Image: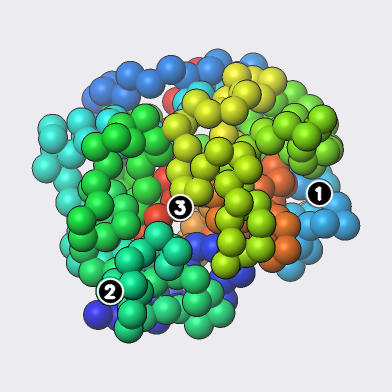
């Protein structure tokens, strides 16, 4: 099996490989089976991006630019294992992790027998390519999601997320929609709740505490994924737009942004990688503080990991 890596990843989500430029598939909805709670956002103009000293300019987080988005509805939380299981039952969908026969799992979750000899991507040795890992078995053989029905589904590729959206009559958010929603009405703040990570000592998101990658003190209550409605929602009523799991966006990746005003930007027409937003339970300030609302990264559309999921939107 090919576990090559097309892009160095300090962002805690290694690539499966890929690399060939492709055009996005159509997203014509079939039905309206997505019954999740969705927040109706009024749309409007906001300041997208950041020039924060704690940011990563090479990721294309800046410049700060004026962006206008139309009204839309967005899931108040990520798609859960329970909801994705319904999609699979009704369609027979096989995820790309299942078709490839493996996916990336955080090494600290694995027994020694699985860690030993497991392929690890260059630059991110805390990931192991595990045979049999998928949304059904997030930590590989012997694991299951039985008690995690309300946790975000993971090991989901961009292509899998689009397949769900087609079935459900929804779509993935554009990157501009995602950031507008994640900011919750706050302007130029670092996090969905303000500029301080733990105001009053209170944890507001599921990220790594301790020394990455060897010790997670789990002071926020979670070593891995948390329920999708854990922690307080942002000003728009959205949960876990910082931390927990990375979320796919519709846009192809680009770092070429201008400071001119734009309306409903959709990203490049083609590319080799898709935008991911929000950070995950593996993010830590020492190497990947991409749980900030303006932070961004990307991955190939066929890639899957144990910290990568999605949420959906619908036109208002």
Tag shown at residue 92: none
158 sits left or right of 315 in the view = left
State how far apart marks 1 and 2 are (Cα).
43 Å
Total residue callouts: 3
Rendering coords of residue 262 (x, y %): 72, 40
Secondary element type, mark 2: helix
Examine the rendered structure and indicate whether residue 62 appears above or below residue 310: below
Location of the N terminus (image quadrant): bottom left
Compare marks 3 and 1 and give the one earlier in the sequence.
Answer: 1
Specify the quadrant of the image occupied by residue 44.
top right
**Measuring 24% from the left and 46% from the top, which residue is drawn there?**
144
Label 1 Cα neighbours within 10 Å, binned few <14 / some 14-19 / many ≥20: many
**Measuring 40% from the left and 55% from the top, which residue is drawn there?**
306
**Foreground residue among 224 and 183:** 224
Foreground disc of the pair 2, 3: 2
Secondary element type, mark 3: loop
**Measuring 53% from the left and 29% from the top, which residue is drawn there?**
230
Compare marks 2 and 3 and give the one earlier in the sequence.
Answer: 2
According to the picture, the residue beneath numbered tag 1 turns out to be: 50
**Foreground residue among 116 and 42:** 116
Foreground disc of the pair 1, 2: 2
State how far apart marks 2 and 3 are (Cα).
22 Å
Label 3 Cα neighbours within 10 Å, binned few <14 / some 14-19 / many ≥20: many
Examine the rendered structure and indicate whether residue 112 appears above or below residue 242: below
**Marks 3 and 1 in Cβ contact (< 8 Å):** no
According to the picture, the residue beneath numbered tag 3 turns out to be: 307
Rendering coords of residue 274 (x, y %): 49, 57
Whether residue 45 appears in this view of the structure is: no
According to the picture, the residue beneath numbered tag 2 turns out to be: 113
Compare marks 1 and 2 and give the one earlier in the sequence.
Answer: 1
């Amino acid at each position: 099996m090919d576990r090559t890596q097309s892009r160095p990843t300090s962002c805690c989500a290694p690539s499966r490989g890929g690399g060939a430029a492709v055009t996005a598939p159509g997203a014509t909805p079939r039905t309206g089976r997505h019954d999740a709670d969705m927040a109706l956002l009024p749309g409007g103009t906001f300041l997208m991006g950041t020039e924060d000293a704690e940011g990563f300019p090479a990721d294309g987080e800046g410049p700060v630019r004026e962006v206008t988005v139309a009204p839309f509805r967005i899931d108040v939380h990520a798609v859960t294992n329970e909801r994705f299981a319904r999609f699979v039952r009704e369609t027979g969908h096989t995820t790309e992790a299942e078709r490839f026969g493996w996916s990336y799992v955080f090494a600290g979750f694995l027994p020694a027998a699985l860690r030993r000899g497991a392929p690890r991507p260059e630059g991110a040795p805390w990931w192991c390519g595990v045979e049999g890992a998928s949304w059904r078995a997030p930590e590989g053989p012997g694991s299951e999601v039985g008690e995690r029905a309300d946790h975000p589904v993971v090991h989901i590729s961009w292509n899998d997320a689009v397949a769900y959206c087609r079935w459900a009559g929804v779509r993935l958010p554009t990157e501009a929609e995602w950031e507008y929603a994640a900011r919750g009405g706050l302007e130029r703040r670092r996090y969905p709740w303000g500029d301080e990570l733990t105001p009053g000592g209170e944890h507001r998101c599921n990220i790594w505490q301790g020394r990455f990658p060897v010790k997670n003190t789990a002071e926020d209550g979670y070593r891995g994924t948390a329920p999708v409605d854990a922690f307080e929602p942002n000003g728009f009523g959205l949960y876990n737009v910082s931390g927990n799991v990375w979320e796919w966006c519709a846009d192809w990746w680009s770092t070429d942004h201008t400071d001119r005003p734009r309306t409903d930007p959709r990203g490049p027409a083609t590319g080799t990688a898709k935008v991911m937003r929000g950070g995950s339970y593996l993010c830590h300030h020492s190497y990947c503080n991409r749980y900030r609302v303006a932070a961004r990264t990307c991955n190939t559309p066929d890639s899957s990991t144990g910290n990568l999921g999605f949420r959906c939107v619908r036109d208002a």
